Image (tube, rainbow, N blue to C red):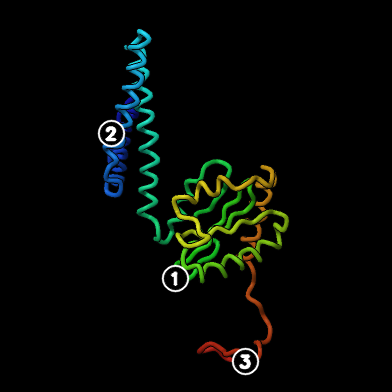
């Protein structure tokens, strides 16, 4: 009981913080939520008077109004958060970290450049999704290299390229999650697990790969301080 009481202020503070953040971008959020709540409650109350049960339907209307306000607020708050993150490095990782059931995603990029362009990977019933973030001219070679590397172990699993952005053929950050969820199912749950295992094994194998030995290629230069043997 004491724990529930201590948790309540924390939740209220989180809701308040989310509302303040959302209002900075969605300035009409208060009017919209208030309108939805009053309209929903008013409709139920009016029906209650018509059927002769205003108290019962008034209580029901209040509950439904609170749920409607919560749903709309959640969606608009999510949209506002995406609006703040859009264009920033790591924004796609934040979306992947909150993917719904059916997808397994690692917010750590599988490929990255010095300019913070990145490629992320998610595995689900639709197959493998490679999500690129950053400059398309730098990201597309990363996507191609990652597909070539994965082809060794998951040749039969569909691979979907998704470039996050607002350009032609790109997916806006706020639509990334729904785009992944709408991809057609192509493999079974067992194949999802097997694919994840293979990709993890491939990552482990590459991380343990020894540095090649042997004669230096023709025309190559020794690093400073190095000596030919």
How far across and down, in percent of the image, does residue 48 sit? 35, 13
In the figure, is residue 205 to the left or right of 16? right
How far apart in space, not on screen, are marks 3 and 1 (Cα)? 29 Å
Lower position in the chain sequence, tag 3 or tag 2:
2
How far across and down, in percent of the image, does residue 125 sit? 64, 45
Describe the element under mark 1 as helix, strand or loop: loop
Instruction: Residue at 69% x, 54% y: name it.
Output: 157
Instruction: Residue at 49% x, 58% y: name it.
Output: 164
Can you say which quadrant of the picture contains the N terminus? top left
How far apart in space, not on screen, are marks 3 and 2 (Cα)? 68 Å
How far apart in space, not on screen, are marks 1 and 2 (Cα)? 41 Å
Which residue is label 1 attached to? Answer: 115
Quadrant of the image occupied by residue 158: bottom right
Which residue is label 2 attached to? Answer: 9
Q: Is residue 194 above or below residue 162?
A: above
Lower position in the chain sequence, tag 1 or tag 2:
2
Residue 29, label in figure: none
How far across and down, in percent of the image, does residue 211 sit? 63, 75
Quadrant of the image occupied by residue 115: bottom left
Q: Nearer the viewer, mark 3 or mark 1?
A: 1
Q: Nearer the viewer, residue 87 or 122?
A: 87
Instruction: Residue at 39% x, 51% y: name it.
Output: 82
In the figure, is residue 117 to the left or right of 189? left
Describe the element under mark 3 as helix, strand or loop: loop
Can you say which quadrant of the picture contains the C terminus? bottom right
Which residue is label 3 attached to? Answer: 219
How far across and down, in percent of the image, does residue 193 sit? 66, 46
Lower position in the chain sequence, tag 3 or tag 1:
1
């Amino acid at each position: 009981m004491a724990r529930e009481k201590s948790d309540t202020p924390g939740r209220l503070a989180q809701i308040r913080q989310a509302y303040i953040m959302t209002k900075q971008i969605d300035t009409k959020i208060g009017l919209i939520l208030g309108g939805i709540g009053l309209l929903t409650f008013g409709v139920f109350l009016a029906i209650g008077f018509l059927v002769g049960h205003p108290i019962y339907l008034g209580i029901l209307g209040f509950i439904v109004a609170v749920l409607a306000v919560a749903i709309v607020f959640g969606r608009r708050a999510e949209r506002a958060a995406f609006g703040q993150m859009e264009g920033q490095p790591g924004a796609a990782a934040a979306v992947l970290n909150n993917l719904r059931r059916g997808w397994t995603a690692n917010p750590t990029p599988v490929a990255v450049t010095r300019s913070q362009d990145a490629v992320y990977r998610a595995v689900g019933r639709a197959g493998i999704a490679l999500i690129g973030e950053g400059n398309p001219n730098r990201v597309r070679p990363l996507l191609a290299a990652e597909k070539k590397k994965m082809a060794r172990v998951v040749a039969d699993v569909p691979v979907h390229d998704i470039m996050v952005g607002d350009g032609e053929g790109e997916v806006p950050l706020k639509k990334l999650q729904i785009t992944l969820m709408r991809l057609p199912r192509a493999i079974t749950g067992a194949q999802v697990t097997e694919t994840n295992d293979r990709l993890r094994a491939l990552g482990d194998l590459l991380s343990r790969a020894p540095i090649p030995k042997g004669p230096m290629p023709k025309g190559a230069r020794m690093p400073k301080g190095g000596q030919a043997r």
